[in-house]
Image: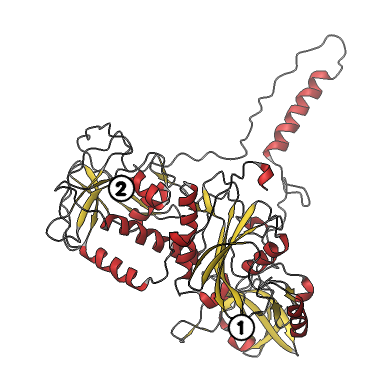
Amino acid sequence: MTKMADNGSSVEIVEGCRLPVLRKNQEHEDEWPLAEILSVKEVSSRKLFYVHYIDFNKRLDEWVTGDRLDMKKLQFPKKEAKTPTKNGLPGSRPSSPEREVRKSLDLNLQTATAPSRGKTLPTPKRKVETVPLATQVPPATPVPSLPSSAEASQASVFPAVRETTTFKAREDHEPISSLTTNGTARRLIPPQPGRKRKANCGGTDEMIKVLQYNNPQSASVFLPPPEDSQDSSDGIPTAPRMTGSLVSDRSHDDIVTRMKNIECIELGRHRLKPWYFSPYPQELTALPILYLCEFCLKYLKSLKCLQRHLTKCNLRHPPGNEIYRKGTISFFEIDGRKNKTYSQNLCLLAKCFLDHKTLYYDTDPFLFYVMTEYDSKGFHIVGYFSKEKESTEDYNVACILTLPPYQRRGYGKLLIEFSYELSKVEGKTGTPEKPLSDLGLLSYRSYWSQTILEILMDLKPDNGERPQITINEISEITSVKKEDVISTLQYLNLINYYKGQYILTLSEDIVEGHERAMQKRHLRIDPKCLHFTPKDWSKRGKW
């Protein structure tokens, strides 16, 4: 609790207050976003305030001095409502529907069993109305989804058009619900009355017709969606699944876990500034720098302790099997049961930069795939992803992270591509565990878009006939789950409705943008350099 002078009056700042705080934006310009005071401390007789910028990511939270606070627009936290009174009597607890029903039933029971003089008279029945605990919400108006396999009709193929050209709307159009990967609707075309479409028994494997005219870079393809799309059930968008093994339960958030507790981490030749809370031992959180061994990830309190540790640490690469190497890039597979200490230290480090996942000390059910960069001193960690040994949800990634010094250099897509290469070897389709962080979602959307467009653009006419492909075949080629394929196409806004059919149109702008992006993507996984044999983890003896 702090008092500051403002226009000659004393203003008391408490935790929970909101006020504008001065900060620099990406263009290094001053701005005053609204922030919430999470904590106040005094260092060397100077007040510091830990602020969270409203509507900004938590990784931007920081300690600020009082001169960066705009006291003129201070908003005090709302006081919690006092316990309501019952029947106007103070101190009584408010009645609940359950208590009222129980009291009524007890009263009836006592009246019925009470002894009476003479003959027993029938007890008048009191009508007890049970109040439901949760009010039922009427179902929302369903949004029609993409046509099922039974409704999908044969596609007519048309040459691609420029973005400035639009198809003329027909009377028999039905609404398209465009969904993002997190289940939110992007665009809705209002339904219009008209004749019904003819049914077709083509099935989910109905071919996608592709025709390339004089301009070989333009094509329109018909994409019948699968029946079991997770993004839309009966046309109603759903939120990301929250049943993953490492999904953080945000109901247990408190003021401690909302604040960064580590000031700085030294890892090899890099110093990292953590973004989020990580449960390192309490005695280490007061240190100005936390030192980590970059090979075994053991945390130490001082540089001298680190130097002494390095004389005894024999590791020059992550423990486990090296299953991929090309150039200076290597991947190591680490069993969370066999290398428990390393896995726990890796989770502690990753939690500094992942907010949507929780930390598990029981690492036995997980495999960790660590990407490293090699030089004369050893294999230096670049990033990693973890996955469950047995996933009932078809997850091929639980947590994924590229360390900040290596971000924006293509390593994130390389980790994602490697996770799908493992799925190809396993003969499965996979999807990342939800929810994804903001940066993770951007990386996955970009990877899915480039991978799917690469497949579609490589289709060639066969003997003068239209090339054909199905959504299932795209999923099998890429190991990307069908739901992710469809949600990506809808996010890119490529699906159009034309002459009673849903078609996917690749315009020249999309093709040119894809080619520019692929020219910048220099890091790729070479399947020939992968030496990986999947295990059947359903047999407990493998653990």
Q: Position of residue 341 (x, y in %)?
A: 73, 63
User: Which amino acid does the dot numbered 1 rest on?
Assistant: Arg
Query: Which of pointers 1 and 2 lies earlier in the amino acid sequence?
Result: 2
Residue at the location (51% across, 47% down)?
394
Q: Which residue occupies the extreme left position in the image?
A: 214
Label drawn at residue 133: none
Tell me, what colour scheme is on the image? secondary structure
Residue nearer the viewer, 135 or 340: 340
Q: Position of residue 150 (x, y in %)?
A: 30, 33
Question: Element type at marker 2?
Answer: loop
Residue 422 visible (yes or no): yes
> Is 49 situated left or right of 325 in this image?
right
Give the labeled residue for mark 1. Answer: 269
Residue nearer the viewer, 53 or 7: 53
Question: Element type at marker 1?
Answer: loop
| Quadrant (top left/top right/bottom left/bottom right) for the N terminus | bottom right
> Is 267 situated left or right of 139 in this image?
right
Residue nearer the viewer, 381 or 534: 534
Residue at the location (71% across, 79% down)?
290
Q: CA distance from mark 1 to mark 2?
A: 51 Å
